[in-house]
Amino acid sequence: MGISTNYAKIRQEIPKDVTIVLSVKTRTVEQVEEVIDAGATDIGQNYVQEAGRMYSALQKKAAKVRWHMIGHLQKNKINKALQIFDVIQTVDSLGKAAAIDKRAERAGKKIIPVYIELNIGSEFSKAGIKPAEHEPFEKYMENLVRDISVLSHLRVNGLMTMGPRFGNPEDVRPYFKRTKRIFESIKALDLPNVDMKELSMGMTNSYRIAIEEGSNMVRIGTAIFGKRKENCGE
Ligand SMILES: *Cc1c(COP(=O)(O)O)cnc(C)c1O
């Protein structure tokens, strides 16, 4: 099946209030253009340079969608990232948040929406904040969000997580449940400059379970564009 058919099918299958972020790492500009033409509203990229190339090649169409940084953001790429992305989903420390804030101020940006990235399975190989390193984790997150909330060029708008990848996607459910609980506990604090709107969790093999567990933003690549070639990167 084609990209636009795949997108339409998934768009129809999931609730209207769930945002689909199209994960476009390693895809071609033509593929991204096709999905924008099919009605996509949000694009996710892991790589700043690849995003920059896509953004320029798409010309006016690029500005019709929201661009989400969903990959690990190195400090030396923040300036470039701020020229492209509307949302940074991968804030994984106070230091990173402060660096984005400083560069946003210099670039004359008003406010950058950010999500905090949790490595909810505390997996060695993955980015994001690992609960196992910061127990009691709910308290740690509360303090972190309080600290980030005073940065005047950022607004904390949600949480993002990958979740461990299992052969049986059902096994990820408890991790999604925990992420949702943390999301709700931060929201309940009702902190100034924090507006917990988006819970970004669920990918091709897990988005149905993620939505059942309260996700309102899924990041999907494979189910729409097909399998990726291995060895992707900048
Ligand atoms: C690649 C990627 C996705 C999409 O994964 P699929 O399995 O292709 O749907 C989602 N989120 C992040 C952070 C990714 O890197």
Image: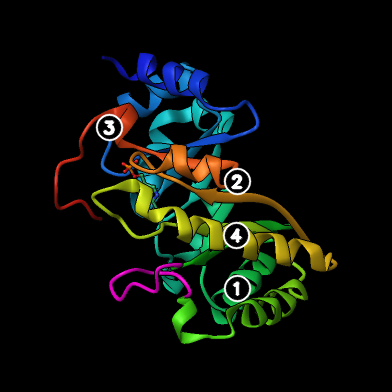
- Please say if 88 is above or below 217: below
Q: Which residue is mark 4?
A: 115
The span from disc 3 to disc 1 (Cα, nearest Å) is 31 Å
Identity of the residue drawn at 60% across and 73% down: 97
What colouring style does the render use? rainbow
* Three-letter amino acid code at the position of disc 1: Ala
Identity of the residue drawn at 46% across and 61% down: 175
Asked if the residue at tag 3 contacts the one at tag 4, i.e. Cβ–Cβ closer than 8 Å, the answer is no
Q: Which residue is mark 3?
A: 28
* Three-letter amino acid code at the position of disc 2: Gly
Query: In the picture provided, is 13 more to the left or to the right than 167?
Result: right
In terms of sequence position, does the residue under pointer 3 or pointer 2 come before the other?
3
Q: What is the crowding at mark 3: few (fewer than 14 residues within 10 Å), some, or many (at least 20)?
A: few
| Quadrant of the frame with the N terminus | top left
Q: Which residue is mark 1?
A: 97
The span from disc 2 to disc 1 (Cα, nearest Å) is 26 Å
Numbered circle sitting on residue 214: 2
